[in-house]
Structure formats: C-alpha cells, structure tokens
Image (cartoon, helix red, strand yellow):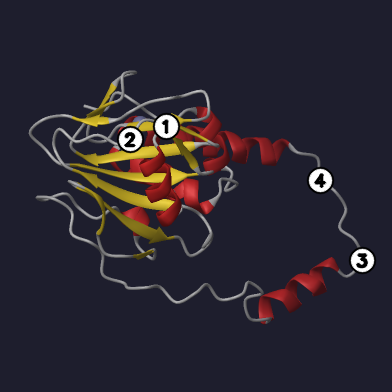
Amino acid sequence: MIHHHPGDELLLPLAAGRLGAGQAVVVSTHIEGCGECRARLHTLQALGGALLEDTDPVALGPGAWERTLQRLDRPAIEPPSPAPARRSHPALPGDVPWPASLRGCASSGWRWIGPGMRYARIGVPHEPTASVYLLRIGAGRSLPRHTHGGVELTQVLCGAFDDGRAVFGPGDFDAADETVHHQPVVQAGTTCVCLAYVGARMRFDGRMASMIGGWIGM
Ligand SMILES: [Zn+2]
C-alpha cells in the first residue's frame, strides 16, 4: 500500500522529458511500483501530445531539413559519459529487486558511514554530477537530524522510516526541501533501503554528521 506519491510538479517535467536525469531515476523508480502514478503520467503525456497537436505550425528556416539530416549522420555530440565504476550492483535485502530505472547506472558497492548505516553512490549516465545514493539503514537506527540546501527526493525500496511528519514505507516517495528539518528513524524489525537524490548539500545539526556528509558529498 503506497501512501506518498510524487506531485505534478515532478510528474509534469518527467512527462515532458524535462526533469533532470538524477531526479528522473528516483521518480521513475517510484512509478515502476505505483499504478496510480503510472496512470497519472500517461494522462500528462497524452495531454502534452494533445497540446502539441493544437499548436499553430511555425515555418522552418531555410536549410532546416538539410541541417537535421546532417545531424542524424553525425556521431553523438554529447561527450561520452565516464566509464561506470562497475556494472554489478550492491545486493538489496531479501527479494527486493534492483529497480529497472537504475539499469544503465553505475554503482559503487556498499560503503560504511556509521554504525548500521551504509550508502552506495549511483552514477547516472546523463547527469554524472547528480548526487544519487542508495542508503541502507538498520532497524531502529536513524539518520542524523538535518535540513536541506535544496530538493531531496527519497524513494523507499524496503523497510520503513518515520521522520516525525509521517511514516514512509515500501514504495512511498518523499520530496523535502529547506523548509523540512527532520530526523528519519528506521522502524524496528527491518532494514530500510532508500534511493535518494540530493539536489544540494544536506545541512546536518551535528558537527560529526556534517563532517561525514562532507566526505561523501551528501
Ligand atoms: Zn505513486
């Protein structure tokens, strides 16, 4: 049962192909497991198509067709993305599947950040500078209290956490920003794994947490 979904402010740019790749992998991972958001995305995509059909045609400049053909013949203009660290991915607890939206993304192995806490860095080919992480936090453990320098998107893959605003369980999505000051606490009984996009550095209350956050670029 999914209780928390991404809003239209994320689904609309995703439908239009305008959401940054780092945020898109997190929102897409949610959509993989959420029929409600999948249907909403299809509606928004259909709406976008209808709007495009209703748009008055604009005359193309001279030579536009030839230039387009030339571009098609040319190899990709984009610089090649850095070679992925590894293609295999870190193991997820139990039978939690690796999200299809992360196929093609590079991933580090699990790295220690504190007692009962590990993270893996995810490399997104189309936005190599995006801060995307998997966080694995043991039952009863908590992330240090923090706020954000920008948007933070979180998709729960398994387990559940409570940050004082709500309980986020498997399949739930959360968007937080600088107005949210919270401490996610993982519920007893299960390990929690989340996929997170961190738009700007997190601001931890504690000095130790700030230092560790700085080390891993979170
Ligand atoms: Zn949803």
Q: Secondary structure at mark 1?
A: loop
Could you say which is closer to the camera, residue 39 or residue 107?
Answer: 107
Q: Secondary structure at mark 2?
A: loop
Query: What numbered label is drawn on residue 205?
Result: 1
Structural distance between the alpha carbons of marks 1 and 3:
59 Å
Is 28 left, or right, of 186 in this rendering? right
Could you say which is closer to the camera, residue 149 or residue 9?
Answer: 149
Q: Secondary structure at mark 3?
A: loop
The residue at the point 24 percent across, 29 percent down is: 185
Cβ of mark 3 under 8 A from ligand 1: no
The residue at the point 18 percent across, 59 percent down is: 91
N-term-proximal mark, 1 vs 3: 3
Structural distance between the alpha carbons of marks 2 and 1:
7 Å
Badge 2 crowding class, 10 Å Cα cut-off, few under 14, some 14 to 19, many 20 or more, is some
Residue type of the residue flagged with mark 3:
Pro
Query: Is the residue 120 above or below the residue 13 in the image?
Result: below
Please report contact status of discs 2 and 1: CB closer than 8 Å, yes or no: yes
N-term-proximal mark, 3 vs 2: 3
In the current view of this chain or complex, which residue is farthest to the top? 165
Q: Which mark is in front, 4 or 1?
A: 1
Residue position marked by numbered label 4 in the rendering: 57
